Image: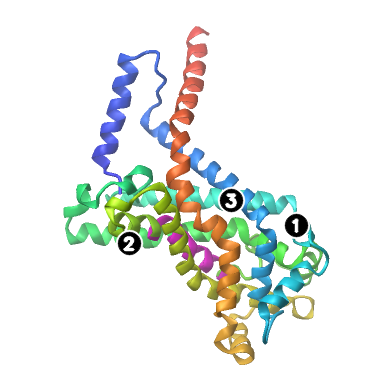
Amino acid sequence: MSSPSLEKQRHRTDELAATTSPHRPSLPSELEDSVLVAYRSTGLGVFGAVMRFAGMPLEKIALFMNSSLVNGSNQFRQAVKLTFEKGMLAPYRVVTSASLVAWFMQYSVMGLAFQAFDHALSKGLGVEPVWYGEELMKPYTDEPSNDRDASYRAKVALKIVAAPILAGSLESVVANRAEVERYFGPRQFAAIESKLGWNPVARIFAPSFAANAARNVIMCNVSFVVTPITYKLWFPQEKKSQASLFYYGMGVNFIGNGIAITQQALWGRALDYAAVGGGQKINYSDVIRLSLKEDGYGAFFSVAKWTSRILMNAPVQGSLPWFYNNILPRGEESVVNAAAMIVGGVAGREEIN
């Protein structure tokens, strides 16, 4: 986790450079932090949208695998057949402009929300933010937090529990409606909504929101908390590299998905329940009871479900920690310099006027 003293030193260095090197662009520290948060969030949004669109066939297979539409033997084959029964391009036909925007917003909001909640809670509790970028490659023994007391560590624990819950829930507010639309298709979803007669607020959340939020909280933890913290603390220092972070992130993602598929399956089965009779209110107790009665524990976890979820999720979610900590930092200096030039140009014109 980055040290506040190091952050203050960095800001003092930037301010000194601005006064001693008038030709070098600079930004006030708070504005620079805001620019970097916006840059990282936008980068995550573009990355997520491109990867999710490219992987739509895998997403549809996973959605069918975690629904009640497949059962018995050869479930993976059943899911593949349902995915492509209307043609090889069928998975892409359910993607609307709303889905593209939702994908972008889902990943950008996830990144923005986690950074915002992490920094706000860190400041409020007097602790350090989660480690980022090159900080993951440095030994933990070099960190000032290494010798903090139990009270400090308790505050850190509280923060790393709260931040993903807040960020994952906000992500579901942005993304769940579009995911439900892709599951049913625009026409069926519109008919179900009409039958339910929900108010505008309920329509924003959309059916099966609770299961969707639980899944996103789990995966937010995997990407922004579990992966960087465990890599920093326990990965052999001599083997740390961009490549090892990429493969480590993939491995942790496989484990995280073992938990997340239970909520993904609950989400899909709850939507099937909601579609009965043209549209009905979800009763999660009934969904779980009926699912267990019909398929046992396999309704929520099986190797086939886990495999399909990995195929859908690993390309984007598994590589996200690597992209966030290794690719995005490469453009930060250029983005900050560009923003400083724009701000400086605006300030210069105001002085002339």
Res. 48 mark: 3
Q: CA distance from mark 1 to mark 3?
A: 16 Å
Q: Earlier in the sequence, mark 1 or mark 2?
A: 1
- Residue flagged by tag 2: what amino acid is it? Leu
The quarter of the displayed image where residue 65 is located: bottom right
- Residue flagged by tag 3: what amino acid is it? Gly
Closer to the camera: disc 2 or disc 3?
A: 3
Question: Residue 96 or 72: which is nearer the viewer?
Answer: 72
Residue at disc 3, secondary structure: helix
Q: Is residue 196 visible?
A: no
Q: Earlier in the sequence, mark 1 or mark 3?
A: 3
Span highlighted in magenta in the image: 211-226
Is 232 in the magenta? no
| 264 on left or right of 271 | left
Where is residue 334? Give x, y as percent.
47, 28
The residue that mark 1 highlights is 92
- Residue flagged by tag 1: what amino acid is it? Tyr
Question: Residue 41 or 329: which is nearer the viewer?
Answer: 329
